[in-house]
Amino acid sequence: MRISPLVICASLFALAACTQQAAEPAKPPVDIGAEQSAISAIIAQMADEAKNKDAAKAASHYTADGVTLMSGFPPTKGPDAIGALYKQMAADPKFALTMTSETPVVSSSGDMAYVVGHYSATMTNPKTKKAVTDNGAFVDVYLKQADGGWKLAVDANVPNVSAIPVVAPAAPSASPSAAPSAKPK
């Protein structure tokens, strides 16, 4: 008995169709409002931890390779190093930190977010031994974790105090020599 090549091809196509893997199930839509609320809760919790000078808990909100960039300190990477920095800051009897933030912006995929806000940090100046306050803005970048929670990947602070004087831009020149010629050629 001879099997036709057409039957063999049809059988191979049928077999291939049966062995194809099922398509990935569609991911449910991201509840942006719920994610914003979760991140806002972390920010409020970190503000309480700063107020209570709980450096270990505050540092626990960072990813394993998270970085904090604070004025007056070198870039600090990882929860252990960030915790040590926070512990040093919290040891200052004059240390105080307040933060206010805008609504977190969550990516449409729900795996990354950022927050912009303002801070006020008071610490002792090591030279004068007097309290100084650093006011500024911050940008925090959060990453969604495998457990569904959020952790800080980057915490960047920008103080309002500038060592560079602000110079107003020069007014445009109104002299006739600076204006382009309107004469036809």
Image: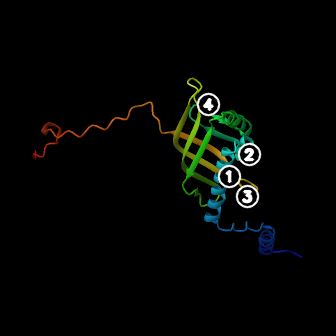
Instruction: Please name the amino acid that badge 4 sits on.
Output: Pro
**Residue type, label 1:** Gln
Toward which corner of the image does residue 9 lie, by quadrant? bottom right
Marks 3 & 4, CB-CB < 8 Å contact = no
- When the figure is inspected, residue 95 is found, relative to residue 112, above or below; the finding is above
Please report contact status of discs 1 and 4: CB closer than 8 Å, yes or no: no
Question: At which x and y percent is residue 85?
Answer: 68, 34
Q: Residue tagged by mark 1?
A: 45
In this view, the mark in front (1 or 4): 1
- Quadrant that contains the C terminus: top left
- Residue that carries the numbered disc 3 in the rendered image: 148
Mark sitting earlier along the chain (3/4): 4
Residue wearing tag 2: 57
> Where residue 181 sits in the image (x, y, percent)?
13, 43
Earlier-in-chain disc, 2 versus 1: 1
Identify residue for label 4.
74
Q: CA distance from mark 2 to mark 4?
A: 21 Å
* Mark nearer the N terminus (2 vs 4): 2
Question: Which kind of residue does numbered mark 3 sit on?
Answer: Gly
Q: Secondary structure at mark 4?
A: loop
Element under disc 3: loop
Total marks drawn? 4
Q: CA distance from mark 1 to mark 4?
A: 25 Å
Q: Are marks 2 and 4 in contact (CB under 8 Å)?
A: no
* Residue found 59% across the figure and 47% down from its top: 140
Report the residue at 63% width, 56% height from top.
40
Q: Helix, strand, or loop for circle 1? A: helix
Distance, label 1 to label 3, CA atoms, is 17 Å
Residue shown at 56%/57% (left/top)?
103
